[in-house]
Image: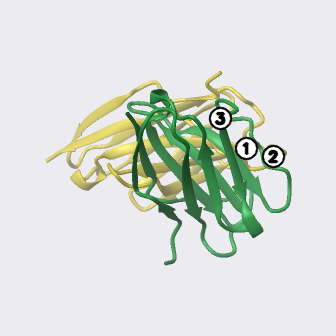
Chain colours: A yellow, B green
Amino acid sequence: DQQVKQNSPSLSVQEGRISILNCDYTNSMFDYFLWYKKYPAEGPTFLISISSIKDKNEDGRFTVFLNKSAKHLSLHIVPSQPGDSAVYFCAASAPGNTGKLIFGQGTTLQVKP
Amino acid sequence: GAGVSQSPSNKVTEKGKDVELRCDPISGHTALYWYRQSLGQGLEFLIYFQGNSAPDKSGLPSDRFSAERTGGSVSTLTIQRTQQEDSAVYLCASSPQGQGTEAFFGQGTRLTVV
């Protein structure tokens, strides 16, 4: 049972444009969400997070939006840069679930110069 | 070092052999996770340690897999009688506490079973 889903395996955008990565979840108990970025041969690195008490969190070029009623979150990157090319994973955790992070399958973003 | 350290970085083993993968978490972090990423797949949860609580082993794929965490610090993931489908990158992560904080990942151990 895939509780966190990233339905787009890949995304290609032009440098300077907006990248939008999407993530859906099924467990309504999830209350904390994170985005990670992963380059080849490296471990994932934390990018940005959002608590379920918010619907938006912004950090520089990165903004995460949370729609609890739709059980959907998205990561916006604007403007996109070639160095943003990586695999992006969303993750979620629930209270009383010992803090275990459940990850999506990942979306490969390619930003073309 | 300041980050999560995993060893070895690469391991090639023959089918049927046992392997041990090591993780040194960030000092002071109470939570430790093991995940694996098979080719073209997402991050599959394996096991989670949080302080002195009983580990959450719900992600271990079979009884050939086990993990321990000694003294609340270093963790070892053991795979017995390795199979080709065990080939993957095994990732360890730690976090300063449990729910509501981000986890910091090591660079992973690439395991190849031939």
Q: Secondary structure at mark 1?
A: loop
Tell me the residue that label 3 is attached to: B64
Q: Nearer the viewer, mark 3 or mark 1?
A: 3
Relative vertical location of residue A2 with respect to residue B80 in this rendering, above or below: above
Q: Which residue is mark 1?
A: A31
The image position of residue B85, as x and y in percent, is 48, 27
Measuring from the top left, give residue B62's x and y in whole percent: 66, 30
Query: Which residue is most to the left?
Result: A113
Disc assigned to residue A10: none
Which amino acid is tagged 1?
Asp
The amino acid marked with disc number 2 is Pro
As helix, strand or loop, the secondary structure at mark 3 comes to loop
In depth, the one of B59 and B11 nearer the eye is B11
Judging depth in this view, the residue of B58 and A92 nearest the camera is B58
Q: How far, Cα to Cα, is label 3 from label 1?
A: 33 Å
Which of label 2 and label 1 is nearer to you?
A: 2
Q: Which residue position holds label 2?
A: A95
Q: CA distance from mark 2 to mark 1?
A: 7 Å
Residue B23 shows in the view: yes
Q: Residues within 10 Å of mark 1 (few under 14, many from 20)?
A: some
Q: Residue at x 69, y 29 (%)?
A: A69
User: Which residue sits at x=53%, y=66%?
Assistant: B4
Q: Is disc 2 surrounded by few (<14), some (14 to 19) or many (20+) residues within 10 Å?
A: some
Query: Does B99 sit above or below residue B26?
Result: above
